[in-house]
Amino acid sequence: MNAVTKPLATIGRVTLGFLALIGRVAIFAGQSIAHIVRPPFYPREFLTAILNIGYFSLPVVGLTAIFTGAALALQIYSGGQRFSAEAVVPQIVAIGMVRELGPVLVGLMIAARVTSSIAAEIATMKVTEQIDALVTLSTHPMKYLTAPRVLAATLVVPLLVGIGDVIGIMGGFLVGTKQLGFAIGPYLNNTWNFLEMSDIVSSLIKGAAFGFIAAVMGCYHGMRSGRGAQGVGRATKTSVEAAAVLILAANFLLTSFFFAT
Amino acid sequence: MIELTNVHKAFGPKRVLDGVNLTINRGESMVIIGGSGTGKSVLLKCILGLMVQDSGSITLDGEDTSKVERDAFLARFGMLFQGGALFDSLPVWQNVAFRLLRGSLAKPKEEAREIAIEKLRRVGLTPDVADLFPAELSGGMQKRVGLARAIAAEPEIIFFDEPTTGLDPIMSGVINDLIREIVVEMGATAMTITHDMSSVRVIADHVAMLHAGKIQWTGPVGDMDNSGDPYVAQFISGSAEGPIEAVR
């Protein structure tokens, strides 16, 4: 192989590897959906996943949203002053949180908290032969481990996004009314009147998509973990990286779909 | 009867199984011996379908294991894993009764719990262990719970993967005796993989030695010491001198 063909071969190998990875992830996601709709179902595992992904994520989602909403209000007020547009703080906080920051921040928080936890748990189960044990006990690992987590994340993350949106708007409201001198009634009116149903629907749909991505990435990398502590660590790290990048990419695509008209 | 014919399995360039031929008769306790990394666990996983052999056939009572209905096939097996492989998130009794709580063998929860406690008693554990989590148990207790799980659904065939690894000699003896008693009592077909010779002498009816991807020698456990096979002789004696290379 000469100096000209060697770089081409490397590019080809990397491209093929990347395409193969996309194919594997797509097949895994498709299999996850198939296992969600086909019995047997594991309601106990599903409820546990609802608790872990939804309820126990509330504190981190709430704290992230309130500080982001508060900072957003300050930024809009400060930036708006440059062209005498301070009055739009309630509207921009609302639209910014609901359309963009709420879903993305909740998605990234879920990627950090839930994807990592799912990947580490399943990877540990793999290296300690618990996945093999499931098979010998006539239980399909994807049905028992993946399907409940993916379904729970897809259903629960939109709720978290909704809660995050409200808390984020409240963060902006607190800063706006306590620090920036907005009156309570007009602030709330401006927020409520400015939002449209499509803003809220797009926010929730983004949440569902991000929840699905976060859970699928955790399960996929956990199931494909290498051996030992290093394998578990690598699976966890890769799952979070992949989930975060895919969430941001999906956010762009969904935003283009909903609003770029 | 489990029959393996010319089974091959390789991982990249490494040939782990290189034409394995082996028959395990119904009700027999077969122990596979061999050094670390010789493919004993791979052999066992190929039989269970956890890995797929590259070539060769594996049959159970004359039926090709790759073509049978998986749930019905697996329902005939119980397995004790090397590290126990207990589910951390479930209490001990739910680990033992896992198969009895879901799937085709599902029973009411109370009945499943009673069976789990009875199986725990059978392996020498008291009922108060039932509500503990696996992380709260010692290594020996985890092995016993794994054994209780393996026998919970009264399988026809039980596999034991390195049942005494990591245990002290007394606990190893207890586990070996338990395995032998349970296999005889249930009339089950058993296949054990180990490199612990004390386990072999207690558990085995027949012994097969796996080396370099092939069955090097097989015969009744009583013939093992006088097999005339230099590989078996070296393995039993634990000598560094002989046909098996000490550095692998």
Image (spheres, coloured by chain):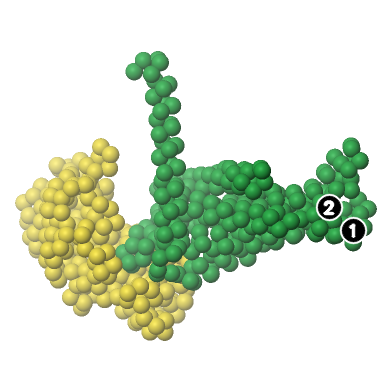
Residue A136, numbered circle:
none
Badge 2 element: helix
Chain ID at mark 2: A
Provide the residue designation for mark 2: A90
Residue A80: horizontal and vertical position, in percent? 87, 41
Q: Residue at x 34, y 59 (%)?
A: A132
> What's the residue type where badge 2 is placed?
Pro
- Tell if the residue under mark 1 belongs to the same chain as the one under mark 2: yes
As drawn, is A33 to the left or to the right of A54?
left
As drawn, is A239 to the left or to the right of B183?
right
Q: Which chain is yellow?
A: B
Whole-Å distance between the Cαs marked 1 and 2?
9 Å
Residue B57: horizontal and vertical position, in percent? 15, 54
The tint of chain A in the picture is green
Q: Residue at x 74, y 56 (%)?
A: A196
As drawn, is B54 to the left or to the right of A19?
left
Residue A175: horizontal and vertical position, in percent? 86, 53
The image quadrant where one finds the N terminus of chain A is top left
Q: Nearer the viewer, residue B191 or B246?
A: B191
Q: Are marks 1 and 2 in contact (CB under 8 Å)?
A: yes
Residue A186, numbered circle:
1
Badge 1 element: helix
Is residue A241 visible in the rendered structure shown here?
yes
